[in-house]
Amino acid sequence: MSVISYRQALHDALREEMLRDDEVFLIGEEIGVFEGSYKITAGMLAEFGPRRVRDTPIAEEGFTGAAIGAAMVGLRPVVEIMTINFSLLALDQIVNNAAKIYGMFGGQARVPMVIRTPGGGGQQLGATHSQNVELYYAFVPGMKVVAPSTPVDAKALLLAAIRDDDPVLVLENLALYNTTGEVPDDIEPAEIGRARISREGADITVVSYSRMATVALSAAEQLAAEGVDVEVIDIRSLRPLDRPTIIASVQKTGCAVVLEDDWLTYGIGAEIAATISDGAFDWLDAPVRRVAMAEVPMPYAKSLETAALPSLEDAMNAIRETLDAVARRR
Amino acid sequence: MSVISYRQALHDALREEMLRDDEVFLIGEEIGVFEGSYKITAGMLAEFGPRRVRDTPIAEEGFTGAAIGAAMVGLRPVVEIMTINFSLLALDQIVNNAAKIYGMFGGQARVPMVIRTPGGGGQQLGATHSQNVELYYAFVPGMKVVAPSTPVDAKALLLAAIRDDDPVLVLENLALYNTTGEVPDDIEPAEIGRARISREGADITVVSYSRMATVALSAAEQLAAEGVDVEVIDIRSLRPLDRPTIIASVQKTGCAVVLEDDWLTYGIGAEIAATISDGAFDWLDAPVRRVAMAEVPMPYAKSLETAALPSLEDAMNAIRETLDAVARRR
Amino acid sequence: MSTSSKAPRRPSRRPGTDEPGAPAQQSDRSLAPERMLAFYRQMVLIRRFEERAARAYTEAEVGGYCHLNLGEEATVTGVTAALDAGDYVYANYREHGYALARGIAPGRLMAELYGRQDGVSRGWGGSMHMFDLDARFMGGYGIVGGQVPLATGTALAIDYRSGPEAVVCLMGDGTTNIGAFHESLNIAALWGLPIVYLVNNNGLGMGTAVEQSSAEPELYKRAASYRMPSARVDGNDPVAVFQAMRIALSSAREGRPYLVEAMTGRMKGHSVVDPARYRSREEAEAVKAADPVAAFAVRLRGQGVLTDDLIVSIDAEVMSVVAEAVAFAEESPRPDVSTLFDYTYATPVPNDARLLPGAALYPAAPRPVLAGASV
Amino acid sequence: MSTSSKAPRRPSRRPGTDEPGAPAQQSDRSLAPERMLAFYRQMVLIRRFEERAARAYTEAEVGGYCHLNLGEEATVTGVTAALDAGDYVYANYREHGYALARGIAPGRLMAELYGRQDGVSRGWGGSMHMFDLDARFMGGYGIVGGQVPLATGTALAIDYRSGPEAVVCLMGDGTTNIGAFHESLNIAALWGLPIVYLVNNNGLGMGTAVEQSSAEPELYKRAASYRMPSARVDGNDPVAVFQAMRIALSSAREGRPYLVEAMTGRMKGHSVVDPARYRSREEAEAVKAADPVAAFAVRLRGQGVLTDDLIVSIDAEVMSVVAEAVAFAEESPRPDVSTLFDYTYATPVPNDARLLPGAALYPAAPRPVLAGASV
Ligand SMILES: Cc1ncc(C[n+]2csc(CCOP(=O)(O)OP(=O)(O)O)c2C)c(N)n1
Ligand SMILES: Cc1ncc(C[n+]2csc(CCOP(=O)(O)OP(=O)(O)O)c2C)c(N)n1
Ligand SMILES: [Mg+2]
Ligand SMILES: [Mg+2]
């Protein structure tokens, strides 16, 4: 067991799989000579050479599609798309090829590939570089989408993604790369499609993923001081979505808040709220509250960006107000 | 007042706006010489010439982006993207440029453009050509997305879209082109952002849009014979979403079913269900039921495709079962 | 498991500069008689299969979009004949002929068109998405240009494994205007991948002429942007196509990817439902006059390889193959609804949503008696 | 409102074939002394502005990504000087210098970097997204290649209106590998649009050398795929760039779009936070040695246009302009949160969601007393 960063956990997972299996290789922009925009692949070119750590031209559609074509004949490419914003240029290849090839051809060809890509705002990167569009992939049958919030999950889920025979998008987050946590040395791949109860509690369920899952935990800790016992669910897998774990929790607590880093209307939280409102209908004592980004193109100015992003305070208020609403109804 | 097809209504709107305003022009693949894949633009090249009816190379990203750039200096391009599936290739231009330019530059440049594109499955077109991905645009602040289900709305909303100073995606539907309805000759542009109650009823609210809004009406008519009084809401505008109209209806009926043609998990219906479950929480007597496509890459074989698509029967069953659930609870 | 220091299989990763964009040298356009006859038989089979497919479409046995290789039989035949068994083929949606020529049983192809269980894609793909891993026929694709990065990636995999195979990536003339084409050619040339891009220039997108869509209508010249050698060839001559492809494939196998532009004609509309009214009578007549099947028959008869009797007997033979294919398709069952969720994922995972439309996410549950509920 | 039968403004819509890809003819590289001096002043202003921006970044006054034009002053100056007042400029995220040279007040640009209300994009854009409609400076764009279709579309609008303007679309060398570049050039050439594509070839993407990303590293040659004339020019010489751009712009105005490749060097990392460790000491030294500002000073001094005194006084003058810009930025207020929803839509619509994060969609409502409720 050692305490390492989220970045290191991803790096370690990549390196271990590269050592284990020659058919695993890395491909993306600036991952080799530049050592990765966010340095996840630092040192890998030197260790594995250009055959297995392949710097590409700026051509998201081309190199993502090439990775799919390599996976169709059995290689296991791990694509880095510099940020999820740029993945929009490869969306057709991901949605129309990676996600469909297994089904469209009647189960003949598998696409064992991984796309690693960070989301996240809050770095004053402006409208085009601050989006959280994991929804675009989570919506698509044939895709698997995981979104770890901790170093241990980052490693376990990336290992699982690489060994999985379907296309898996691993959503990372700029604000999480430097966070740290304990990771067992002999960690096993996680099971894709399972949520994790990251804190047990009796009063209210907070559902989240990626960066907001860490905000959820902070909120829970702070509210514990006020005597509120929050259960925190980190869904980890956006597709498949572990509905049973979420519903079981809300059937216990009777109320829920969803925290997300994307836009509210039609965002990931909409499905979670709809699922809870359906599966725990008779247990709910207040509407499911969603805390999300303001629905604007993200402004650059710090004053505006801060206002547009959901904060710990926003999360705590929503939890408190939901508990008030419950109290009024019980 | 005349009875015309949905196709004709779109055609008429385009033609009238072309006659009214020289700055309106059409651009897209095969809209001129070929007269449009679905013949909406039939006769337009002959009438308006190649300056205003511009056949493009197969380059969705290029010509959609070019339309945006033309709109930035005041022209009013109406882009045809042959089907919404191909729009994925232009997604970056739409999401990162069209939707953001007004905000990202602090309100200096407007993007008065329209993207017309049909969705729709059920034609045995297989996995890549049968998708309903309006979600991808409805999710994005800065975009407006309308989805008419009738000839009158098709015309009124397309007129509104062309006169609007923001990028508007007009979602058409392959299965609706030949449907007919009354359209007043002196029709005014509709107001984008308003739902329409297409049938008033007291027992249950059915919310839908585009093709499924016509299924909703059929279901309501059939169920009327069983003594069930269904209120049908055609949301028409996916973004902005007219929450007040939906909520007012459910506060009256106490229960709701959502019909949609896209995939269930994270689909458009998720937001509608979440919105209802929140805004009408204390009025709801049963969970909001969603009827949607099966979550698979759409198969070609008719037997499978039929099974994967939501049908009138599916809609009626969901309505009946929801009313049963209400009865058990009241 | 090998080490990472594997030596590159190919001498140079960079194509170099000798004559990118030069037209293929035209060698003698004759092959052994049996070979020529086999080409002819192949072309007739494609012709008859496609005609039968069109009929099945009008009979509503085939659905969706259906694009035929009518008029492209020579190119299909020449390309396919040049391949080794291990080579991979990626196509667009106009791929029936290539699948046939690759040796896939006509019955399985017809069954796919019919949407049946024994179809080559188990009925999931239809006309646009035929696929057979054994034949290394890597699919028809419906999104214009969508196959080009994939094919490039399979070439990358061959290179990665130092394999002897090559990839042929088929596309139409209109496809050379879409971004994926350019991104892919650059990648292939940069990395010296074993791939041949075959542009079937039938003069039209759907109804748009090449000159209306490509600012450089001599499409093979576009390879020069990537220092990639290329050639234009008469797509109505199967031998010329075959020979150009041999040159291209051996270049590709040596790490110099290649682009071949085959000049063909589209005998019918873009798809079976397109009456092609945008085409003048003269244009249509010209394509008809250049009919590659008829022309090859005349040529082989002139060479004494083909006789009128042989023409009749080949046709009869082919017609019976096609009739058998239809019978096979008709007898194959329609896929059962119980298989609807079988091909979403290759690696099963928990919580995959497997609901038929309208099914409740949660079965109706009774309202619980809540401790402390005040209402 | 005009009719649809307007005659085309340009004689030929098609560029024709005369010498696509030919290098620009090099005429005498001197202009009037005042002009040369103005170029020099411009270059120094860019240099000092960018240095000050870098400092502001380390002071945490500037956030996000910040890419500088250090080393590209000659190209920026030459390009901008060649433009008419009505011409449009589209840039990528490395655009401060172009915005300055286009005549936008340095204070408004600095204020944008500081994220202030008086910034050229009202604080909404930041370093990557400067925009000023009056200056026809149509924006920095952060998505590589994203600006290229837009610029092409503005050229289409000029053509549509038979206007006299032209568009210049700036981009880096790495951008020539992305699909949007190719789709756009084809469209521009096909329709004869008044646009010049300017590839600033600074030899690197972020850390990737041109030769590692472009199979044809002589990037201007790629224009030939679209029968578009093109030229490569010394980007360290503002006069050479200016002259090449004049040729290119007049070609564009006649309906023959043009591509210019300017050979420059990037003096620092890709963005201000990049230490550029991937670059060898020799490479870094070579770029430094080619410093276009220093080189131009030497040249002008040799020609007697510039003296040591003048060098000092221009620098002092420029430094005070930059200092004033900083003062302006510092004094400008930060945008108020009340303006957060002001720029989502230009045409207001009902039901636009205007919620701050965490705000309730629906205020807490009491449970109604239901008629006939059984619980
Ligand atoms: C991205 C995309 N855009 C548009 C279409 C619609 N479409 C199908 S085939 C076709 C024409 C393709 O022309 P070409 O590449 O010459 O191939 P051909 O059909 O002539 O063999 C078009 C525009 C599509 N399938 N995909
Ligand atoms: C589509 C896309 N992919 C990747 C990036 C990240 N990125 C930003 S700048 C850059 C390099 C661009 O190189 P070049 O075009 O040569 O321009 P330069 O920065 O050298 O001026 C990359 C890869 C991006 N912004 N957009
Ligand atoms: Mg064609
Ligand atoms: Mg560069």
Image (cartoon, coloured by chain):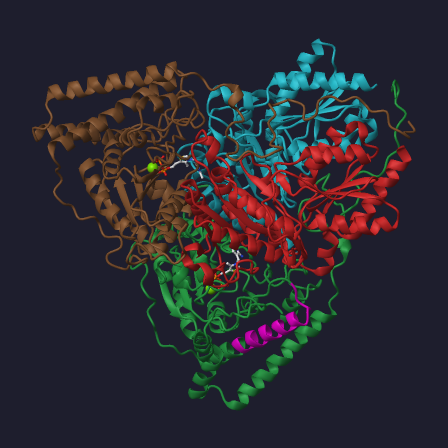
Chain colours: A cyan, B red, C green, D brown
* Residue at (62, 44) in percent of width and height: A166
Tell me where residue D253 appears, x and y as whole percent. 27, 49
Q: Nearer the viewer, residue B160 or C261?
A: B160
Q: Nearer the viewer, residue A6 or B185?
A: B185
Location of the C terminus of chain C by quadrant is top right
> In this rendering, is residue C79 above or below D290?
below
Overall secondary structure of the magenta stretch?
A: helix
Residue A241 visible somewhere in the drawing: no
Quarter for ligand 2? top left
Tell me where residue C207 appears, x and y as whole percent. 48, 64
> In this rendering, is residue A142 above or below C59?
above
Location of residue B330 (image quadrant): top right
> In this rendering, is residue C218 above or below B269?
below
* Residue at (76, 49) in percent of width and height: B217
> In this rendering, is residue C274 above or below B1?
below
Which residues make up the magenta segment?
A: C43-63
